[in-house]
Image: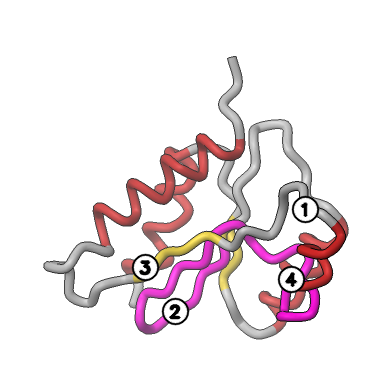
Amino acid sequence: MEKSEDLIQQEIWMYYSNKYCLKHHNPRHIIYSVPNGGKRDAREAKKLNNTGLLKGTSDLVIDTGSKIIYCEVKTPKGVQSDDQIDFQHRANSLGRDYIMPRSLDQFIALIEPLITDQ
């Protein structure tokens, strides 16, 4: 059975948080999710749009102190929306790294070279 995006994202967040974001880590990285999806009523959607919701924003943002890395989590069969593709292009045009792992193992393979070359 294929894991859901939510489960893959949870595994990624837990791994990264434990490896780089605990109080004893120096520098202490930051990883956080961007709740950009889900079902909302019209009032809540309007409020979020009026306070800066950006369609297509990546699921996770990683701050290493010297880099910002955007992480869009997908299942093995998942595809980006047009808004997600646009966000990726915007992030890359600003010189930011953007990764799209489909498993925890793939996340580790993608993230480690980005954070160890600092």
Q: CA distance from mark 2 to mark 1?
A: 32 Å
Instruction: Judge whether 17 appears above or below 11 on screen.
Output: below
Q: Which residue is mark 4?
A: 48
* C-alpha gap between disc 4 and disc 2: 27 Å
- The residue that disc 2 covers is 67
Residue indicated by mark 3: 115
Quickly name the residue at label 1.
Answer: 40
Horizontal and vertical percent position of residue 88 = 72, 67
Q: Nearer the viewer, residue 40 or 37?
A: 40
Q: Is residue 105 placed above or below 65 in the rendered structure?
A: above
Circle 1: residue type: Arg
Q: Which SS class for mark 1?
A: loop
Closer to the chain start, of discs 4 and 2, is 4
Local secondary structure at mark 2: loop
- Picture layout, residue 117 above or below residue 35: below
- Assess whether mark 1 and mark 2 are in contact (beta carbons under 8 angstroms): no
Q: Is residue 63 left or right of residue 33?
A: left
